[in-house]
Image (spheres, rainbow, N blue to C red):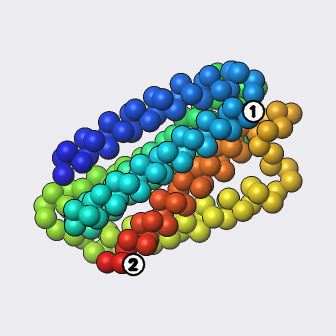
Amino acid sequence: MATETTSSLVIWMTTLTIGMCAIILSAASGAPQTYMAVTALISLAIAGIAINEQRALEDQTAAKSLISASTARYMGLVWAWGALALTITYLFILPRWHEWPTFAVGFAIVAVLCLFFAATLNNDAEKGKDDETMLRLGRYLTIAQLIGTGAAFFGLLIDPDKQFLNVKKLDWAAVNVFFFGAIALAAISAHALFYARKT
């Protein structure tokens, strides 16, 4: 169990480091297409790694708490990635979009909550027990996140004011972070719920 946690932390640090370097280079290049591609690649890579780890734990018939902890950690990684991407993009590179601090702080808070939830579930797994109340709470939160991210995904698609590549709109970079982050969170949530239904 400790090995799984350590492995996840290594993936966390590696992903965030590579992601931040890529964001800096793509934002500084002045090519919105590159920024969009990098944002999509990092977000979807996190989702792919999360689902792969969940399946590996399922194949090992790991405790439900351990699988749920893994899911929460990777959800937290997506939120942390979003917070850092917005901060680096608008604090250091692109012209200031006045709403970015609100979203960055909000994302960071959710990331910390996900980590706390993951740590609690991990402690349960180490004690060899599954707290059904915590697992049920995690399921409800995952359902809420799936609904919320789905709504954000479709909202960004149909809102004519939200444009992914129009640099005249100060929030164009944030729209990319929101959109692909929503896809990643929706994918992680949907897979977690599918596993929960199977078991």
Residue 184 x %, y %? 54, 53
Residue 134 x %, y %? 32, 69
**Picture quadrant of residue 177:** top right
Q: In what element is the residue under mark 2?
A: helix
Residue depicted at 35% across the width and 59% down the height: 54
Residue 123 x %, y %? 20, 56
For this rendering, which residue is in front, 138 or 66? 66
Q: Is residue 78 left or right of residue 87?
A: left
Q: In what element is the residue under mark 1?
A: helix
Q: Is residue 21 left or right of residue 65?
A: right
Q: Which residue is mark 2?
A: 197
- Give how far apart the Cα atoms at labels 1 and 2 are: 40 Å
Q: Which residue is mark 1?
A: 32
Residue depicted at 74% across the width and 60% down the height: 155
Q: Quadrant of the C terminus?
A: bottom left
60 shown above or below 163: below
For this rendering, which residue is in front, 51 or 159? 51
